[in-house]
Image (cartoon, helix red, strand yellow):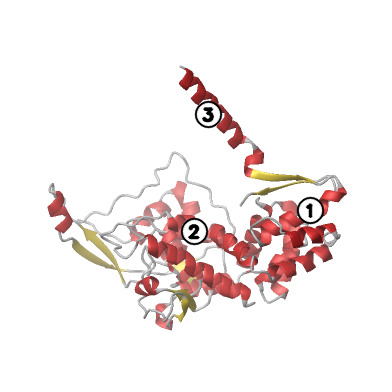
């Protein structure tokens, strides 16, 4: 009985801790003017470095260098020249591109023998280095969707079907016939938006709508069965044919017409990002013996792929490859604005609201005027009220 009472008491304490906003957020009371610059220093450090402010930053706060937007901007530029800024960028990229999903992904070994933990880790490192190259070399950040190169090791080279680089994660150019470009042609995106047994056009379209266009697509109605019928050996079909069930259902069509056509345009790349010319189906015989099942040969059916895609809502948005889709996204103001929103959300630890529209517009204008230099976007956002709070404001931001 005593042990049971102890466990119930411990459970109550832990539940109270987890429900407390102080466990999930840091909350800074800035009603006292003397604490305001130190609150700004903390926000700058977590935003740009993903760590606590160092002695130099606290000294800047003490000297009053963080009391004005101009002072904050000068400090932010110095911080971006620090090696610590790499940690801040890496954390943003890992959250924006959902590294957790690929690191926790599983694949059917009979279909994707190359996939393992080491390959998944390499996928995240590729994306990290690719984005870092654009940022720290002051390139046009919208090339994140259009660049024809990446940084790979020998494991990734096997997926990309190119020769391994001389050193791990050297820069490698993709040939034009590969039709790869930017994040959309990289293994990370193509893997994290797929399922263990194959590609998921719906998942790919949804990710692009939410992460690159900042649109919210509602979940399916609770009364709708979102599971598609399994593919049968007697009637093999492609994903395009299977997903017709979504658009033929009036309860599903509204949302799926927005997301499925995007993912279907990327069907030339399988569930680990390897290019394919056919949709290959493997049908294994059902055997009672485990030994026999492991050595059984599957029946292979290859179907033609239709990789025509479209981004409904964007003008002239037909495409058939990641390269074409990347060009479309990079050139649209909605995608450019979404990049600004994603960085703002990371900085503020919350979704943007209509009240944030003026500051987001100013940051977008600075981003565009700079030729889409990401560091200029970071600096532009440090000049907002999220970093320089008014008196008697309680700031709430996520603990990343």
Q: Nearer the viewer, residue 70 or 271?
A: 70
Q: Residue at x 33, y 71 (%)?
A: 276
Q: Earlier in the sequence, mark 1 or mark 3?
A: 3
Q: Element type at marker 1? A: helix
Residue 351: x and y in percent read 65, 51
Residue 275 x/y as whole percent? 36, 72
Count residues near mark 2 (Cα–Cα under 10 Å), then give few for <14, some for 14-19, many for 20+.
many
Q: How many numbered marks, from 0 up? A: 3
* Residue at the (43%, 77%) spot, across then down: 179
In the picture of the structure, the residue carrying the numbered disc 3 is 11
Query: CA gap, disc 2 to disc 3?
Result: 31 Å
Q: Is residue 279 visible?
A: yes
Residue in front for this viewpoint, 239 or 143? 143
Relative depth, front residue between 67 and 332: 67
Write the residue at 13% across / 47% down. Answer: 288
Q: Which label was assigned to residue 99?
A: 2
Residue 279 quadrant: bottom left
Determine whether 388 is above or below 146 in the image.
Answer: above
274 displayed left or right of 2:
left
Q: CA distance from mark 1 to mark 3?
A: 36 Å
Which mark, by number, is residue 30?
A: none
Marks 1 and 2 sit apart, C-alpha to C-alpha, by 32 Å
The secondary element bearing badge 3 is classed as helix
Question: Is label 1 or label 2 in front?
Answer: 1
Quick one: SS at disc 2? helix
Give the mark nearest the N terminus, 1 or 2. 1
Give the image location of residue 203, x and y in percent.
45, 56
Residue 38 - label:
1
Q: Residues within 10 Å of mark 1 (few under 14, many from 20)?
A: many
* Mark closer to the observer (2, 3): 3
User: Do labels 1 and 3 touch, CB within 8 Å?
Assistant: no
Residue 118, percent from left and from top: 39, 63
């Amino acid at each position: 009985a005593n042990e049971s009472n102890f466990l119930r008491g411990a459970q109550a304490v832990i539940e109270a801790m987890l429900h407390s906003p102080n466990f999930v957020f840091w909350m800074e009371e800035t009603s006292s003017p003397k604490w305001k610059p130190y609150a700004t220093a903390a926000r700058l450090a977590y935003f740009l470095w993903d760590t606590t402010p160092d002695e130099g930053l606290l000294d800047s706060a003490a000297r009053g260098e963080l009391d004005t937007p101009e002072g904050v901007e000068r400090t932010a530029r110095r911080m971006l020249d620090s090696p610590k800024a790499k940690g801040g960028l890496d954390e943003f990229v890992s959250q924006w591109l959902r590294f957790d999903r690929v690191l926790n992904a599983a694949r059917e070994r009979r279909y994707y023998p190359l996939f393992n933990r080491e390959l998944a880790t390499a996928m995240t490192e590729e994306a990290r280095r690719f984005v870092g190259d654009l940022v720290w070399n002051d390139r046009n950040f919208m090339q994140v969707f259009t660049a024809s190169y990446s940084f790979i090791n020998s494991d990734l080279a096997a997926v990309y079907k190119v020769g391994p680089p001389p050193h791990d994660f050297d820069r490698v150019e993709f040939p034009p016939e590969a039709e790869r470009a930017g994040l959309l042609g990289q293994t990370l995106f193509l893997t994290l938006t797929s399922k263990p047994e194959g590609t998921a056009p719906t998942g790919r379209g949804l990710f692009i709508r939410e992460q690159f266009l900042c649109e919210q697509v509602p979940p399916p109605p609770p009364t709708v069965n979102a599971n598609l019928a399994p593919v049968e050996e007697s009637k093999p079909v492609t994903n395009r044919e299977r997903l017709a069930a979504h658009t033929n259902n009036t309860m599903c069509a509204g949302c799926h017409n927005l997301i499925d056509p995007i993912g279907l345009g990327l069907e030339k790349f399988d569930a680990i990002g390897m290019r394919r010319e056919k949709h290959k189906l493997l049908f294994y015989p059902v055997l009672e013996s485990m030994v026999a099942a492991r050595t059984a040969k599957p029946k292979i059916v290859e179907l033609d792929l239709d990789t025509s895609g479209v981004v409904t809502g964007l003008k002239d948005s037909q495409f058939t490859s990641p390269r074409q889709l990347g060009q479309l996204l990079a050139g649209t103001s909605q995608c450019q604005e979404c990049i600004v929103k994603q960085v703002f959300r990371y900085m503020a630890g919350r979704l943007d609201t209509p009240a944030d529209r003026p500051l987001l517009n100013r940051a977008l204008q600075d981003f565009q005027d700079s030729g889409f230099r990401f560091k200029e976007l970071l600096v532009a956002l440090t000049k907002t009220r999220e970093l320089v709070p008014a008196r008697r404001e309680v700031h709430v931001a996520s603990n990343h």
